[in-house]
Image (spheres, rainbow, N blue to C red):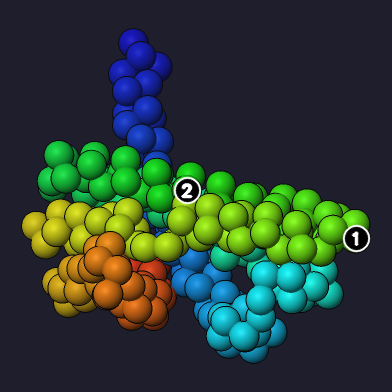
Amino acid sequence: MTAIAQTPTNTFTRTENQPVSLFKIGGLAGIIAAFTFLFGFALFVTTFEPLTTGELNSVETVEFLRDNQTTFYVWNLVIYVLFGIMQAVLTLAMVERLKSIAPGIAQIAAALGLIWSGLVIASGMVANVGATAVIDLYATDPTQAGTVWTTIDSVYKGIGGGNEIVGGLWVLLVSLAALRGGLPKALNLAGLLVGAAGIITLVPPLADMGAIFGLGIIAWYIWTGVVLVRSKS
């Protein structure tokens, strides 16, 4: 009888410990996600500046990719694939934290967070596979390689960040749900602003708001990550 009575208690203890572990893992994922943004921005304004200023035509762009293929490959792995994985982990941690406070919003946010993860991972893979293909094609037909890259560039940017509507909605909904508790109020207000900046990029004349979203979400990820890592319940 004693052994039977102890079984539910032990099971309950393990269940109670699971969210704490997930919060801490999610917090670390958020901090890593922030550093993928920092890594991306660092290369964006240094090594890959010729790609961002528009000074290269399509053929010259393929030549640049050929000369910087390894760096470009690693860049995409970090800012898209690694970020997407970290985003998925953080999404699961956030839905666990918010599901008892705002279950409906938390579930919608979870769906958007996982969709965002899938989109950015796919974007990075398309970019790397596409770059390899056009570099190979460049050896026999540079002009055709440039034309093909123009198409690939539009596809992978469209999937992964031509606008930030999905990411913006995710941050906005998480912050809206957390206003009922679960995260500091100041963090939630910052998240609402960051999320709104991401959503606004859907409007072509305001696409430059993507930079504000990118910089703002770095701070939001770090702040959120620290809060989750320090969670005791």
In this view, which residue lies farthest toward the top? 1
Q: Is residue 36 above or below residue 141?
A: below
User: Residue placed at 9% from the left, 57% from the top?
Assistant: 180
Q: Position of residue 200 (x, y in %)?
A: 23, 68
User: As drawn, which residue projects farthest toward the left?
Assistant: 180
Gap between marks 2 and 1 measured at Cα: 31 Å
Counting other residues with Cα less than 10 Å from the Cα at mark 1, is it few (<14), some (14-19), or many (20 or more)? Answer: few
Q: Amino acid at mark 1?
A: Ala
What residue is disc 1 on?
Answer: 139
- SS category of the residue bearing label 1: loop
Residue 65, visible in the rendered structure: no
The residue sitting at 69% across, 84% down in the picture is 47
* Front residue of 92 and 149: 149
Whole-percent x, y for residue 214 in the image: 40, 75
Which numbered marker is on residue 126?
A: none
Q: Toward the viewer: 147 or 225?
A: 147
Residue visible at 25% across and 66% down in the picture = 203
Dividing the image into 4 quarters, which one contains the N terminus? top left
Image disc number at residue 119: 2
As helix, strand or loop, the secondary structure at mark 2 comes to: helix
Quarter of the picture containing the C terminus is bottom left
Q: Find residue 36 and report its horizontal and vertical position in percent.
A: 55, 70
Q: From this viewpoint, is residue 94 visible?
A: yes
**Quarter residue 195 falls in:** bottom left
Q: Which numbered disc flags the more N-terminal residue, 2 or 1?
A: 2
Q: Is residue 174 left or right of residue 9?
A: left
